Image: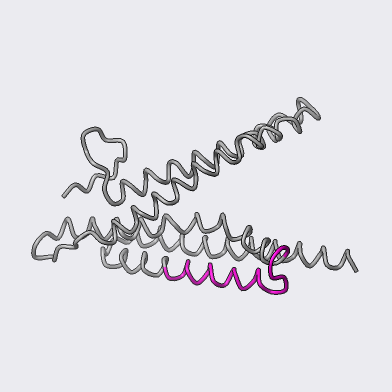
Amino acid sequence: MSLSVNPFQKGVKRKGLAVVIFGACFVVGGLLFAFAPALLALLLFPIVGEGGGAAIWFMILTLPVGTAVAMFGLVTMIGGTIATLRMKLPTEQEDAVTRNRLLSHRAIALASLLPLSLIPTPIVAFVLTNMVAGGNSGTTAFYVIAALQIVAGGFALYFAIRTKRAALIAILTGVVLLSLAGSYALNDYVVSLETLNSVENL
C-alpha cells in the first residue's frame, strides 16, 4: 500500500492524505487567485491612490474562477479524507509502523478540514441573519458549524492520541482550538454588525 503524501510524485497514484494535500493546494490557490486584485490593491493603494479601486473591479473576473477552483479543491479534500478514513488499519502485530502512519494520516486529514470551516462561517451567519431567517438564525448556524468542528476535531485528536506522538497531538490540539476560537470570533463579528445595523435603522 502506497502511503506517500507527495501529491505530485510521478508514477505514484495519489491516495488518502496525498489527495487531501492535492485538494488543499487548489483551495489555497483558488482563494489567492480570487482575492488577488484586492490584495494587490491593498499593497499598491498608498502608491497609486484611487487606482487601487480599479484593481478591485478585476475581482469580477477572478472571484468566480477562484471560487470554482477552491470548491473543486474542497470537494477533493473531502473525498481524500473519506478515502483516508476508509483505508484498512492493520493491527500492531501485523504492521505497527504502517498502523501509526495511517492513524497520523487520518488525524491530519480530519484536522485539515477545520481551518476551511472558518470560510463559510461568517457567510452562513450573514446570509441567514440578514437575508433568510433573521433573528438568531446566524448564531444557530454558528453552533451547528461549531458542533461539526468539535466532532471532526475530536476524532482527529482521537486518532492522534492513538499514535502516541506528542508533537502531533499538540499541533492538532492547537488547530482545533484556534479553529473554534476563529469561528466564534467571526460569528460574533457578523452578529455585532447586524446589531449595529438594527440600532441605526431605529
In the image, is 54 to the left or to the right of 159? right
Q: Is-magenta flag for residue 79? A: no
Instruction: Give the residue displayed 49% in from the left and 38% down from the top.
Output: 29
Where does the image place residue 88, in percent across and percent down from the top left? Answer: 19, 61
x and y percentages locating residue 9 in the rendered image: 26, 35
Residue at position x 11%, y 59% in the image: 95
- Foreground residue among 190 and 132: 132
What segment is highlighted magenta in the picture?
A: 130-151
Can residue 167 be seen at all in this image of the molecule? Answer: no
Q: Kindly indicate the quadrant of the structure image that contains residue 55.
A: top right
Give the side of residue 183 with respect to residue 190, left or right: left
The residue sitting at the front extreme is: 132
Who is closer to the viewer here, 145 or 91? 145
Main SS, magenta residues = helix
Give the quadrant of the C terminus. Answer: bottom right
Residue plotted at (79% across, 67% down):
195
Residue sitting nearer the eye, 63 or 152:
63
Camera-side residue of 96 and 27? 27
From the viewer's perspective, tell me whether residue 149 is left or right of residue 102. right
Decide if residue 178 is on the left or right side of residue 194. Answer: left
